[in-house]
Image: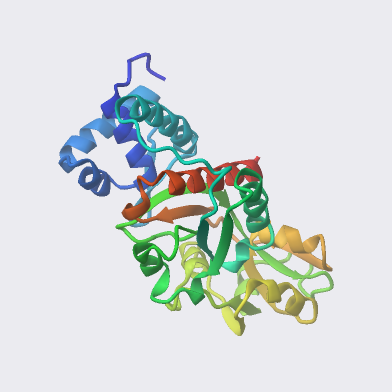
């Protein structure tokens, strides 16, 4: 990394770029022109020796090194802000407010329990409610805009452009099937995968081309879904009694292989990793309570990824 000193302006541009993953949104939020932000990005790339943002399809995503810079940059900016703009503090130990998080149920078995544990440790008098994204009237965007939701967690490739976004962690797609499945270990080739019958779960996204199908298409794969379920928690139990295949994340699949006679097979080819994000609206961007909740979720994600 360059020994050149980074000033508070570049630090703010760096943090906003990594959170928003967009030069245009960063320019809008900071009240600058896109060329000005592009020049700052080039300078930051030279200073860090890393591209920071790389293209993935139609959007930009942070590099692995860039993800490690988000927390230090945020801490530095918070320290500067605390000096220049003292604000009302928030004390989680004494608050009794209710926080609401929207999340898909594939996070229920490993992420949500960890968040609940840390939440009640830090805020013993507060309440936390998790809302399934399919149950939020008007969708998760409306939930955040109206204040019904404080935060939304998911793994979209293209989340809503007008929302703030922070990468949390990454996972990969794998195929889950029963132990005695006719497809033998190591034999899940592209033709076998595409000829098999698949199980899928309906998500908040009504578009037939959901996250998984988009990733499969990137890898030249398609699947024939013959069974659809409303919840991820049902899928492993259906797999045990069928020859269906279930494409899901490794973390979720690994959890159920420890409980049921199931096994994991790699997806044919080299599918790209999925990134989990937390999203929030500008209306809570400067809220001390909401910022605490985001830090808590980020802390849990980091610890689970270690």
Q: Residue 27, how many percent across, how many down?
A: 21, 43
* Residue 186 seen: no
Looking at the picture, tell me which residue is in the foreground, 296 or 5.
296
Task: Identify the image quadrant of residue 104.
Answer: bottom right
Q: Residue 216, how many percent across, how many down?
A: 52, 66
Task: Identify the image quadrant of residue 138.
Answer: bottom left
Task: Judge left or right: residue 157 versus residue 6.
Answer: right
Looking at the picture, tell me which residue is in the foreground, 185 or 127.
127
User: Which quadrant of the figure contains the N terminus?
Assistant: top left
* Residue 251 seen: yes
Q: Residue 258, how many percent across, how many down?
A: 81, 60
Point 70% across, 62% down: residue: 253
Looking at the picture, tell me which residue is in the foreground, 306 or 101.
101
Task: Judge left or right: residue 109 versus residue 131.
Answer: right
Task: Judge left or right: residue 34 versus residue 185.
Answer: left
Point 68% across, 56% down: residue: 113
Point 69% across, 61% down: residue: 109
Asked if residue 77 is positioned above or below residue 94 in the image, the reply reads: above
Asked if residue 173 is positioned above or below residue 167 in the image, the reply reads: below
């Amino acid at each position: 990394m360059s020994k050149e000193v980074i000033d508070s302006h570049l630090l703010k541009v760096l943090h906003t770029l990594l959170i928003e993953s967009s030069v245009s949104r960063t320019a809008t939020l900071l009240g600058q022109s896109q060329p000005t932000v592009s020049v700052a990005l080039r300078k930051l790339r030279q200073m860090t020796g890393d591209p920071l943002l790389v293209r993935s399809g139609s959007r930009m995503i942070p590099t692995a090194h860039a993800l490690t810079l988000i927390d230090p940059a945020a801490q530095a900016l918070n320290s500067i802000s605390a000096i220049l703009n003292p604000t009302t503090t928030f004390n989680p130990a004494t608050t009794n407010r209710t926080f609401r998080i929207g999340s898909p149920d594939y996070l229920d078995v490993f992420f949500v329990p960890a968040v609940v544990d840390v939440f009640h440790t830090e805020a013993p008098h507060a309440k936390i409610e998790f809302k399934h994204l399919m149950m939020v009237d008007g969708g998760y965007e409306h939930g955040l805009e109206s204040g019904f939701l404080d935060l939304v967690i998911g793994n979209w490739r293209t989340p809503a452009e007008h929302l703030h976004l922070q990468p949390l962690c990454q996972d990969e797609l794998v195929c889950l099937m029963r132990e005695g499945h006719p497809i033998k270990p190591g034999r899940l080739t592209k033709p076998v995968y595409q000829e098999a019958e698949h199980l899928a779960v309906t998500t908040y996204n009504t578009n037939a081309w959901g996250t998984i199908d988009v990733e499969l298409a990137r890898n030249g794969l398609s699947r024939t879904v013959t069974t659809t379920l409303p919840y991820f928690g049902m899928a492993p139990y259906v797999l045990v009694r069928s020859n269906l295949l279930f494409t899901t994340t490794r973390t979720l699949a690994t959890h159920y292989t420890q409980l049921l006679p199931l096994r994991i097979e790699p997806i044919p080819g080299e599918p790209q990793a999925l990134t989990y994000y937390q999203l929030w609206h500008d209306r809570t961007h400067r809220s001390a309570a909401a910022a605490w909740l985001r830090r808590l979720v980020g802390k849990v994600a980091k610890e689970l990824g270690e």
